[in-house]
Amino acid sequence: MEGVIPDVQPVQRPGTVLLAATPIGDVEDASPRFVRALSEAEVVAAEDTRRVLALASRLGVRVNGRLISLHDHNEAERADAVIDLAADGARVLMVSDAGMPTVSDPGFRLVRRAVERGVPVSALPGPSAPVTALAVSGLPSDRFTFEGFLPRRDGEARRLLDSMAKDPRTLIFFESPRRLNETLVRMAEAFGGTRRAVVCRELTKVHEEVLRGDLNALIAQTSGEVLGEITIVVAGAREDQNAEDHVVAVLALASEGIRLKEAAAQVSEATGLRKNDLYKAALRRRDSER
């Protein structure tokens, strides 16, 4: 009928699970669809119920649905109960503290159980720290991998970084501000100190800061106190670089009386190649010439 404005349809269908991205800093990044979903959902599963209520207050919206705490420590045991509610026809909204659920945040187990039980799952796109950091980094974005947080144990972190040293894709990591400097040191040892990288701090917030340079420069820039949420973006390995191409330089330094490992370290600093690869290549060449 002419002149009749159609009713606004709900942003979420009954009997579904909707993963909703929340602002990673600036509250105005919340979309109108998110605001509607937050008010219309019968169930809101949240990583931290206090945070979602605080976010709703800042957005001027009331959470009318049932609030359920769903975080890393209880998701496995609560996922089925939440899916039961969706299976009975409820609109279930899943939110994490910041960014998209399941991306280094709770939600994966919930989605997996929903898929296994045939409950529809959809996503309400929005802010994402890894993609935002990649976009502002100026590093190649055609191929990239998100690695989340490195293991806390030194040996595990070093082994994981060593396994990525020859990956040509841009690498994205989360890190605690307290561990930022030591993580950059480990990266320099694994990737070479001249590997380009970017440290993004407090993205979209008032004190947003983007530090650019090679890993050596970033180590120097982060030697003091660092605060805030941190995302690190590291350039992928250059496929045209080969340790064998720089063996002569390593052996030349060694012939001047420098220990072979130290010579490999110096060439690593200059080329961005891994110290261990240079050392092993030089050792093989030296042994073969004896």
Image (cartoon, rainbow, N blue to C red):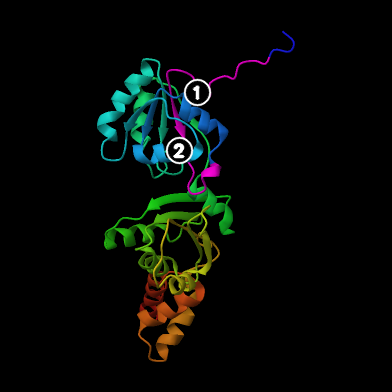
Question: Residue 220 location, x and y as percent?
Answer: 45, 74
- Residue 290 in view, yes or no: no
* Extent of the magenta region: 5-29
Q: Most extreme residue toward the bottom, as rendered?
A: 256
Question: Residue 92 location, x and y as percent?
Answer: 41, 25
Between marks 1 and 2 in the image, the one whose residue lies nearer the viewer:
2
Looking at the image, is 110 positioned above or below residue 91? below
Residue at 46% from the left image edge and 86% from the top image edge:
252
Residue denoted by label 1? 12
Residue at 46% from the left image edge and 76% from the top image edge:
269
Residue denoted by label 2? 57
- Assign the magenta stretch its main secondary structure: loop
Residue at 50% from the left image edge and 67% from the top image edge:
195
Look at label 1 and name its amino acid.
Gln
Find out whether residue 6 is within the magenta segment. yes
Mark 1 or mark 2: whose residue is earlier in sequence: 1
Q: Secondary structure at mark 1?
A: loop
Q: Secondary structure at mark 2?
A: helix
Looking at the image, is 183 positioned above or below residue 131? below
